[in-house]
Amino acid sequence: MGTALVYHEDMTTARLLWDDPECELECPERLTAILERLQQSGLQQRCQRLVAQEASEAALGLVHRILIVDWDIHHGQGIQYVFEDDPSILYFSWHRYEHAQFWPHLRDSDADVVGQGQGRGFTVNLPWNQVGMGNADYVAAFLHVLLPLAFEFDPELVLISAGFDSAIRDPEGQMQATPECFAHLTRLLQVLAGGRVCAVLEGGYHLESLSQSVCMMVQALLGDPTPPLSGPMVPCQSALESIQSVRAAQAPYWKSLQLQGATPRLSSGTHSLEGRPSTLLPAGLELKTAAAHAVSALSSLLDQLCLHPRSAVHTAAALTPLDAALVLPPDILHLEGSTQETQAWTRPHESLTQDQALTPLGQVLYLLDKILDGQVGSGIAATPAPTLNATLDVVIRRSLSHGTQRLFCVTMGQLDRPPDLANDGRSLWLHIGGKEATALSMFQVSMPLHGTTGGFLNCVLSLVLPLAYGYQPDLTLVVLGRTHGLQGPQPALLTALLQGPAGGRILVLVEEESTPKFAGVLAQVLHGEAPPSLGPFSVPFPEDMQALMYLRQQLEPQWKMLQVTAPS
């Protein structure tokens, strides 16, 4: 499945024939700046060029459930009105609102406007009530509002109203989200609808910010690693107020929000007791600091496009023995080498000293070194079940000794936490499927899970991804142990979603007995393909929800991306 680019040259010549100061921002240079940047970065050459043509009735009838994600800074009231009573269209819009003080000044843009008739709950408005929203605010909105609803809706196509007036330095939006944020947002949407995502250019009036943001989005569509997000991943209070309001407004219509305990809250446009709106801007010093950081981030973005090239090998596999029936993408590299230092790393694990354990360990370390050196983007390796715990301990120690500063380790099944795992912040250990919910520290967490689709999704969206984006790892390990209890699509979805925070640097370890069932689909998502659908949404077990709520309460003071309500 490729990525196509559609445009018409006539769009680069159209100009307003009369003077109108309000419309001066709409100019053909917006498109030419994008096309020039796509050509300079080599992205246009990697896209298929499609000729624009009228859609046929047959083509329009191919899909029946469509998600529209409108990240333009202006509310898309026209789209809302067209589909407000249609349950086959889920329309999500975030927009600059400022308690109806910003255009189009409509009450219908507020969070408690949810659609009409059969379409109630299928219009989702997230109003931003102050300027200066940044990367953390945008990602939090996706994790805690859009994605829970999108997975429950299960679209067949995702359309992005891709307006980049919501990006840094745009005169209309006055927001602080840097261009790489849109790569992350795109990557989060690509796990839906079998990866069928269509982005249509809308606003964006700062030419440098616009062109770089589009490039970042196209890189994500092409499957390139996402650059790390700049700035602290801490949503601001105003953003949390908006997120809390929209979750409360939508909770009556969505099981995924009801189960998370979305509590009623006054509309985001409601005035305070004194009859005045809440403060629209952060403190002056905070805003100036954020603006200075954002300008610095934007000025370095062009360099980032070159500093984060694709690895020579996108994905590699170390699977021994390679199952004859295993279907892997044809350009995945099969590594057969071994690290010469393998013997030295086996201490103090007796189980690794046997000859039959040394070979797979050497292959795992060889693959790990290729990832750490940047020669390989991501990889998957098989390990004998009896030595998986010991192998994981060696992989963690070797990663940290080779300069990894933030290692995120997500384990599932019968796996023990390494006994000497340091609590110094260089590693974050999250075990899914433990006997009870525990947080020994902010860096060592265990979450029980009983395998329903709803429980798995809640765990991933409400715990795993907020921790990942808050931690911003250099490398992520995903480890499937025995009796992990996950269904086929679930590990693939988890792996696909974790590619964003780690910049694509993921090593997946699978115990050998599970290799025939999981290795193929895991390799495919590492290589950029969309994960299979989870199927119909199912309600989590109450004990799983209780465990999740307990862990969130324990961890929210340290990990701010877990928050879904504003501090009182």
Image (cartoon, rainbow, N blue to C red):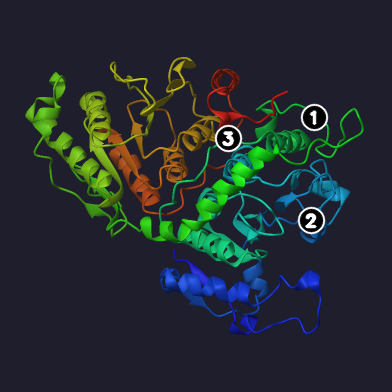
Label 3 to label 2, Cα distance in Å?
30 Å
Give the labeled residue for mark 1: 265
Q: Residues within 10 Å of mark 3 (few under 14, many from 20)?
A: some
* Picture quadrant where residue 430 is located: top left
Compared across the picture, whether 445 is left or right of 536 comes to: left
Can you tell which mark lies on residue 178?
none
Q: Position of residue 481 (x, y in %)?
A: 33, 28
The residue type indicated by label 2 comes to: Gln
Which type of secondary structure does the marked residue at label 1 adopt? loop
The reply to whether residue 523 is visible in this rendering is yes
Across and down, in percent, residue 126 comes to 73, 44
Callout in the foreground (3, 2): 3
Q: Earlier in the sequence, mark 3 or mark 2?
A: 2
Q: Is residue 310 above or below residue 43?
A: above
Above or below 4: residue 182? above
**Type of amino acid at the residue the image marks with label 3:** Val
Q: How many numbered marks, from 0 up?
A: 3
Crowdedness near tag 2: few (<14), some (14–19) or many (≥20) residues, C-alpha within 10 Å: many
Give the residue type that dot 1 points to. Answer: Arg
Q: Which residue is mark 2?
A: 80
Q: Residues within 10 Å of mark 1 (few under 14, many from 20)?
A: some
Cα separation between marks 3 and 1: 22 Å
Residue 411: image x %, image y %? Answer: 37, 28
Q: Which mark is residue 234?
A: 3
